[in-house]
Amino acid sequence: MRWLIVTLAFLLSAPAVAQETAPFGLRWGMTSAQAIAAGVQLVEPSKYLSGLTFMTRSLPEGLKDTGWSSLDFNKEGKLWRVSTKSTPFASDPFGRLVRARIDELVDAISEKNGEAQLVSVLPSTVKLAQPDRFAESLYLKQRVYGFSWLTKAMIIDITAESEDDKTYYVLTYRDRKLAEKALE
């Protein structure tokens, strides 16, 4: 009987929605105050229909080549999306550096989340389809190169992007349940 009372007391004191582990030492559903308490330095938010987006350069557990990150909180103030943008790979017109780094990350993410799906669109012009025009075709939005995972709990995307001949990757994690609510 005593065991039943202790168990009921524990269950009643637990939060109604358990926070799931998010990437980079964060937790899905955490508030911006909880993120700050975890050591994240949030910059003034941008307001969107789906809630608030904060920029940061400090995550509890970041990637070695992260340039910046953004944390998206829904209208209830709960974390539902985490995005990181790498530091640029300078002079990468062929995209070799960014693709090599994406391949490393795809292998690491696939170990935990299953096989990735390639997301690729080639340029419609012969000129932009040339290997030395990889970065330019990304910049002109004529090419898409990335990978995507759809798990029971998350949607994960990594894409190559470009500014002139500098390339970088953007890695985005979304909690499926909270994303549905944020995008309603």
Image (tube, helix red, strand yellow):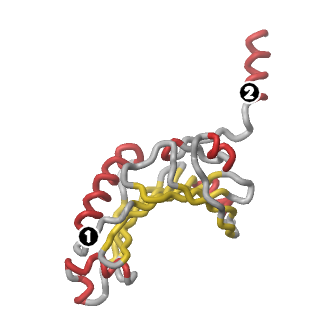
- Does 8 appear above or below 182? above
**What crowding class fits label 2: few (fewer than 14 Cα within 10 Å), some (14-19), or many (20 or more)?**
few
Residue type at mark 2?
Leu
The part of the image, by quadrant, that contains residue 93 is: bottom left
Dot 1 falls on a residue whose secondary structure is: loop
Residue found at x 33% / y 54%: 106
* Res. 36 in view: yes
Residue carrying label 1: 95
Labels 1, 2: front one: 1
Along the horizontal axis of the image, is 16 left or right of 173?
A: right
Residue sitting farthest toward the top: 2
* Residue at mark 1 to residue at mark 2: CA–CA distance: 52 Å
Residue carrying label 2: 11
- Percent position (x, y) of residue 29? 65, 47
Residue type at mark 1?
Gly
Residue found at x 41% / y 47%: 113
**What crowding class fits label 1: few (fewer than 14 Cα within 10 Å), some (14-19), or many (20 or more)?**
many
* Res. 157 in view: no
- Does 6 appear above or below 176? above
- Does 89 appear above or below 112? below
- Percent position (x, y) of residue 100? 25, 59
Quadrant of image for the C terminus: bottom right
Along the horizontal axis of the image, is 36 left or right of 155?
A: right
Viewer-proximal residue among 64 and 133: 64
